[in-house]
Structure formats: C-alpha cells, structure tokens
C-alpha cells in the first residue's frame, strides 16, 4: 500500500482544513515547495496536491505553485481542485502533473468525464468526497443526493484510473479512517481505491492493510504528518512490512496482505 503525503494549497500556502471548512484552515508552511521536497526526502513515492482556491471557484488557481513543485521533484504528482473542464485538465497535464482528480465534474458532467477518460487514458482519477454517504461538491460546500457507491460504480464503468475516497467528517480530525465505508466501496468496484481522511497514527495506516486485497491500494496522509503524529519515513517502512505487532488486538485484524 502506497502512503501518499498531501499538500493543500490555499492562497499559495500549505494549509490543512478541519472537516473541509475553509474558515478553519491552519497554515503549516508559507513555502509548499519546501514541504514537497521534505516529503520526497523522507521517501514519498507520490504526492497529492489539492488546489483549495480552485475547488472553491471552479477552475485552477494555484497553477504556478503546482508547476514549481512538479519541476522541483522527481516523483509523480496528482492534483485536484476546480477541474471542471478539459482546459483545466489539459493545462495541468501539460506542466507535468501525472494524474488529475475530478470531483464536482464527476457528479455534474458525466459526458466530460467520459471524454477525458478516453482522451487521457490512465490519467483521470475521481475524488469522491462523502458526507454521511452522500457526495459533496464545489469544494465540499454543497452536498448532493448522489450516493458515494453509486458514483463509484458509474465512474468505474468509464475507465477512471482510481477512486480517492474522503470521509469529510474525518478529514483533518485525526479521528481515524472510516474502514466500514471503505470496505463497502471497495466491495462494489474493481478499480483501485485510495483512502483519505482521518489518519492519526501508524496504527491507522496498518489497519487499512486488511482492505488491500479488496483494492485499497493507497492512503493519503495530511494533518498527521504536519502535527508530527505520523513520521512519513516510519509510516512507509511500517506499511511496507505490515508489522502486526504495531496493531492493537482490539482492532480485530489477524492477518495482513
């Protein structure tokens, strides 16, 4: 399972939100490029970037910062936030972003996702951000009537490369991942799933290894890295070896793939 550090960009700075609330943002660095280099130095094999300004207004905003990060590091970068048309997607891919993440567009513009999957095969990821099982859109400001599992099944049929599943109520809270929701989602589709939201410890990461055989192939870690609750280097080592001794018996897992 791949451990993927997250950098959330707001007004050019590296921040973290609490449950997706822009008014509860906490600035962790004025220089996101330095943060990216730090994660690479600690062993990151992929970087997850979110353009929070873009997510709010509906088009990429922090493109220059993203390009600077892409040029500064040698690992794949995936980017989401405000990608609701072909122009924004093509712009990011042209500057070297490996994969782009569609969120609102997946709910509101099914034909666009279909077109992009055909044109940019393997480069389109869909981010499903759920609040009580329903998909949130427009920077998590609005909640649709679409069930997360229904959307995942629709997107899988279009050939998206992966699904990033975020439980909004756990994002930025350090409350642990929603394993039940992830298990339900993974059981409903056959494409890779990347878990996001709530990771607070290496134990949380190890608990997700039980879902790897179902297709949960990666996990995004944000706030826990910035608060020091999780060391990226140690997390990568632990997940790579699947150390059972690090998992409390009350989690109920006996084997890891």
Image: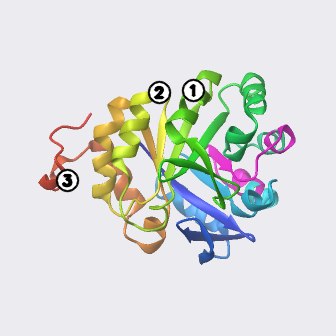
Q: Is residue 106 left or right of residue 239?
A: right
Question: What is the tally of numbered marks visible in this picture?
Answer: 3
Question: In the image, is residue 108 part of the stretch drawn in magenta?
Answer: no
Which of the labelled discs sits on residue 156, or is there none?
1
- Residue that carries the numbered disc 3 in the rendered image: 247
95, 100: nearer the viewer: 100
Q: Can residue 87 be seen in this view?
A: yes
Sequence order check: which comes first, mark 3 or mark 2?
A: 2
Look at 40% across and 42% down and name the residue there: 182
- What colouring style does the render use? rainbow
Give, as a single range, the part of the protein colored magenta: 67-89
Q: Say whether marks 2 and 1 touch (CB < 8 Å).
A: yes
| Marks 3, 2: nearer the viewer | 2
In the figure, is residue 154 to the left or right of 111?
Answer: left
Can you give x and y, in whole percent of width and height, for residue 9 in the image? 68, 65
Q: In the rendered view, does 204 fall on the left or right side of 48?
A: left
């Amino acid at each position: 399972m791949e451990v993927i550090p997250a950098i959330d960009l707001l007004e050019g700075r590296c921040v973290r939100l609490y449950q997706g609330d822009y008014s509860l943002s906490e600035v962790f660095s004025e220089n996101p490029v330095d943060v990216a280099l730090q994660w690479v130095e600690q062993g990151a094999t992929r970087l997850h970037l979110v353009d929070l300004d873009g997510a709010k207004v509906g088009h990429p905003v922090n493109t220059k910062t993203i390009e600077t990060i892409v040029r500064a590091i040698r690992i794949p970068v995936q980017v989401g936030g405000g990608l609701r048309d072909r122009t924004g997607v093509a712009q990011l891919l042209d500057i070297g972003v490996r994969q782009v993440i569609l969120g609102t567009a997946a709910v509101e513009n099914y034909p666009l996702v279909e077109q992009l999957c055909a044109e940019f095969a393997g480069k389109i990821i869909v981010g499903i951000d759920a609040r009580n099982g329903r998909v949130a859109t427009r920077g998590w400001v609005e909640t649709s009537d679409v069930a997360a599992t229904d959307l995942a099944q629709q997107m899988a049929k279009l050939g998206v490369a992966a699904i990033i599943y975020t439980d909004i109520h756990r994002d930025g809270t350090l409350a642990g991942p929603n394993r039940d929701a992830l298990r339900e989602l993974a059981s409903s589709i056959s494409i890779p799933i990347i878990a996001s939201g709530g990771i607070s410890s290496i134990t949380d990461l190890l608990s997700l290894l039980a879902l790897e055989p179902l297709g949960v192939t990666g996990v995004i870690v944000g706030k826990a890295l910035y608060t020091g609750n999780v060391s990226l280097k140690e997390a990568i080592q632990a997940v790579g070896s699947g150390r059972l001794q690090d998992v409390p018996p009350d989690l109920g897992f006996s084997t890891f793939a």
